[in-house]
Image: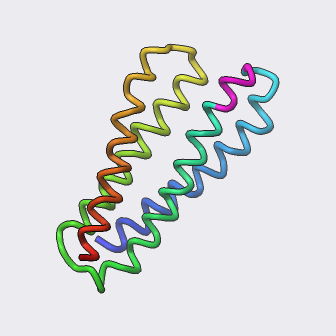
Amino acid sequence: MERTFILIGALAGFLGVALGAFGAHGLRTRLSPEMLAVFETGVRYQLIHAVALLALTGLMDRLNGWLITAAGWLFLTGIVLFSGSLYLLALTGVTVLGAITPLGGLAFLAGWVCLAFAAI
């Protein structure tokens, strides 16, 4: 599982940097400032949780159990739902996608709670 989370974290980090650069250079003139901020929020949360996934792998030997694994999968779910929905919302303007964003936020929160309980 450690290698899986390292791979996912590394890919999420790579994509976060690439999407951040795309937003800063390719979308600045194409999106409104509000939608650019939405896109940048998706990038920020993706990068934070990519690093969290990588850090989690260093804890797996010390905090063995299903909670640490659940935290990793919840972080990934949060990246896909939270950041992904914000990217799509910013790029398409389809506001119904904003309904998915809180589900990703809940996945992030649940991941942090799982990590906390794994430490206990």
Chain part drawn in magenta:
32-37
Foreground of the two, 104 or 84: 104
**For residue 66, above or below residue 22:** below
In the rendered image, residue 34 lying in the magenta stretch gets the answer: yes
The residue sitting at 74% across, 29% down in the picture is 27
Looking at the figure, which quarter contains the C terminus? bottom left
Q: Residue 80 in the image: state x and y as whole percent.
A: 41, 41
**For residue 56, above or below residue 94:** below
Give residue 112's quadrant in the image.
bottom left
The residue sitting at 71% across, 36% down in the picture is 23
**For residue 101, above or below residue 32:** below
Q: How is the image coloured?
A: rainbow
Q: Give the overall secondary structure of the magenta segment.
A: helix
Foreground of the two, 115 or 92: 115
Residue with the most extreme bottom position? 62
Looking at the figure, which quarter contains the N terminus? bottom left
Q: Residue 65 in the image: state x and y as whole percent.
A: 18, 74
Q: Is residue 36 left or right of residue 43?
A: right
The residue sitting at 26% across, 62% down in the picture is 114
Q: Residue 31 in the image: state x and y as whole percent.
A: 72, 21
Give residue 62's quadrant in the image.
bottom left
The residue sitting at 31% across, 67% down in the picture is 116
